[in-house]
Image: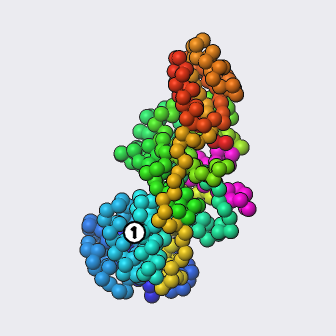
Amino acid sequence: MINIAILGYGIVGSGVACVIEKNKKEISKKAGDEIAIKYILDIREFPGDPYENKIVNNINQILDDPDVQIICETMGGIRPAYEFTKRALLEGKSVCSSNKELVASHAPELLRIARENNCNYLFEASVGGGIPIIRPLNYSLTAEKIDRIVGILNGTTNFILTKMEKEGADFATVLKEAQELGYAEKNPEADVEGHDTCRKIAILSSLMTGQNVKYESIYTEGITKITANDFVYAYALDMTIKLLAISEYDIENNLNVCVAPFLIARDHPLYFVSDVYNGIFVHGNMLGDSMYYGRGAGKLPTASAVVSDVIDAARHIGKTITCFWDDNAIKLNPMDEYRGSYFVRAKDTPENIAKVQELFPDFVVVKQAVTGDYAFTCGPVAEKDFNEKIALLPSGINSRIRICI
Ligand code: HSE
């Protein structure tokens, strides 16, 4: 029998217990031994819960018990998850985590400690919820040089943008609805400002490069400035607007990573990733394109990914599974150097129109859909040059959105 402990009996933690209970036979067969929950750590009490007698509130009870071989860290946040994870790995207990904040900020150190103690730090659930994406990058695509990852990595913002598109509603109205439905948090900042997506693309970029992509260095822009009128133009262009995380090598082998809303054309497979779903598009130099799609959040999909790591850890007791993510921080290309195409809603004045024609030789006018706009596309152009030129428009702009190419 392999005893496990769950740290944090919230949505994902209780999901882990549920998945283990429901698929007990399958899981034990695949793990090669019976998987049994011995403890659940939480400061709260759960009277009447089927796991009531497993709840403990002192981490030492778990860490000091040599019978516990695998720990599921479903607490979220850095403290105390970081300390608990480190101590568990130092004891030779594998840790399976859904905690993207902790993975994005401390994975190289935790992976090293796991190696030194012949156990594993696994984190399939930290990106894309139930979608297998960490394992494909780490195991399946190892013959590839992966040169591009484009992802819709946040279910909340994808739900909001999909609803704005379908209903012609504004951001604030849809956010309120999403909060009422429980899709968006009361404090939605981490999702709508792109911070959650930023952590997730930092993790994927680190696995893509084998080096450490620091989330703090990633240019991040959220969706709060996207309006219903932007979708009117997206429709006219046969495109939609998605919060994308992009990580790619340019022709000089510099790594560009950013999170921002992008216009994306109907012929791109990510165009059809709607509602709370996530999609991750990976390009390898031999394979070409591949795509991973599914439920990127939610109790059971995320818990299923945590339990898949438990099975992997159970199959590798006493051995460390190789994961290429070393401590060297990779230098990212500054956003100024990013070369992209843009859609611009400039203010509709004769001075602006004359200046656009002078500054953007490759501009293409987009039929006016909103009074007061002079809309056009331009590029590819370096972001720095684009910003400098836009600043020279005498009457200014209403908005601009990057175009995914
Ligand atoms: N808030 C996240 C999302 C949860 O909406 O995708 C999963 O990481």
Badge 1: how crowded within 10 Å, few (<14), some, or many (20+)? Answer: many
- In the rendered view, would you say 35 is above or below 245? below
User: Which quarter of the figure is the C terminus placed in?
Assistant: top right
Which residue sits at x=34%, y=66%? 81
Residue 245 is at least partly visible in this image: no
Does the Cβ of the disc 1 residue fall within 8 Å of ligand 1? Answer: no
Q: Pick the residue in front: 380 or 35.
A: 380
The residue singled out by tag 1 in the image is 73
Q: Amino acid at mark 1?
A: Glu
Which residue sits at x=55%, y=75%? 322
- Residue 311 location in percent, x, y? 52, 77
User: Does the magenta run of residues contain 273?
Assistant: yes
Which residue sits at x=68%, y=59%? 284
Asked whether, in this view, residue 220 is left or right of residue 262, the answer is left
Q: Which residues are magenta?
A: 268-289
The total of numbered circles placed on residues is 1
Which residue sits at x=63%, y=23%? 359
- Residue 288 location in percent, x, y? 72, 57
Q: Pick the residue in front: 123 or 334.
A: 334
Q: Pick the residue in front: 211 or 182.
A: 211
User: Which quarter of the figure is the N terminus placed in?
Assistant: bottom left
Asked whether, in this view, residue 118 is left or right of residue 231, the answer is left
Q: Secondary structure at mark 1?
A: strand
Residue 312 is at least partly visible in this image: yes
- Residue 202 location in percent, x, y? 50, 56
- In the rendered view, would you say 2 is above or below 157? below
Q: Pick the residue in front: 359 or 236.
A: 359
- In the rendered view, would you say 314 is above or below 166? below
- Residue 85 location in percent, x, y? 37, 71
